[in-house]
Image (cartoon, helix red, strand yellow):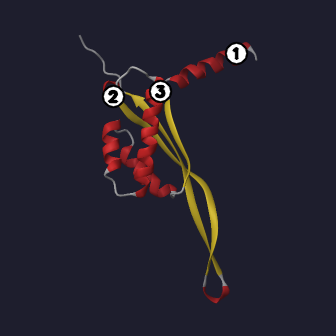
Amino acid sequence: MGARKRLRSEKTKEARKSLYIAKLNNCPTSPRKMRLVADMIRGENVEIALHVLEHSPQQAAGRMRKLLLSAIANWQAKNEGVRLEDSNLFIETVMVDGGRVLKRVRPAPQGRAFRIRKRSNHVTLTLGSRVQSIES
């Protein structure tokens, strides 16, 4: 590997150490329904987001809550000895992309068939930390 590629790869590895990401692939919920839940928590504090997801009636909220708990666990694995309450974590980005589509056929009148598309999605959640500035 050349020197430039090695330096660039080391730089990206250092940048990834400060990223706290969790991914959920092929979630059997339509992307449109999952985006409604993602919009509720985008930019919120982690404690508030967990509370909102816990009391939300949507089925996608349960899956999103589990994903958020996974991202918090990833943060704790990289920051041992730091309390969660002191870190001031918030949800930086939530991206919901379309996943694979299962195509099924439903019988219709007069010998025809209608196509059913069972959609899935991929969710990527990134946590960030709001650093409190100490004014003296």
Q: Secondary structure at mark 2?
A: loop
Amino acid bearing label 1: Arg
Which residue does the numbered mark 1 point to in the structure image? 4
Q: Nearer the viewer, residue 44 or 20?
A: 20
Q: Are marks 1 and 3 in contact (CB under 8 Å)?
A: no
In primary-sequence order, the first of circles 2 and 1 is: 1
Amino acid bearing label 2: Asn
Which residue does the numbered mark 2 point to in the structure image? 88
Q: Secondary structure at mark 3?
A: helix
Mark 3 vs mark 2: in front: 3
Name the quarter where the C terminus is drawn.
top left
Instruction: Say if 111 sits above or below 66 in the image.
Output: below
Gap between marks 2 and 1 measured at Cα? 36 Å
In primary-sequence order, the first of circles 1 and 3 is: 1
Name the quarter where the N terminus is drawn.
top right
Q: Residue at x 25, y 14 (%)?
A: 135
Amino acid bearing label 3: Ala
Gap between marks 3 and 2 measured at Cα? 16 Å
- Name of the residue lying farthest toward the bottom: 110
Question: Residue 128: x percent and y percent?
Answer: 42, 30
In primary-sequence order, the first of circles 3 and 2 is: 3
Mark 2 vs mark 1: in front: 2
Q: Which mark is residue 131?
A: none
Q: Secondary structure at mark 1?
A: helix
Q: Quarter-wise, where is residue 103 in the image?
A: bottom right
Mark 1 vs mark 3: in front: 3
Q: Is residue 125 left or right of residue 135?
A: right
Which residue does the numbered mark 3 point to in the structure image? 77
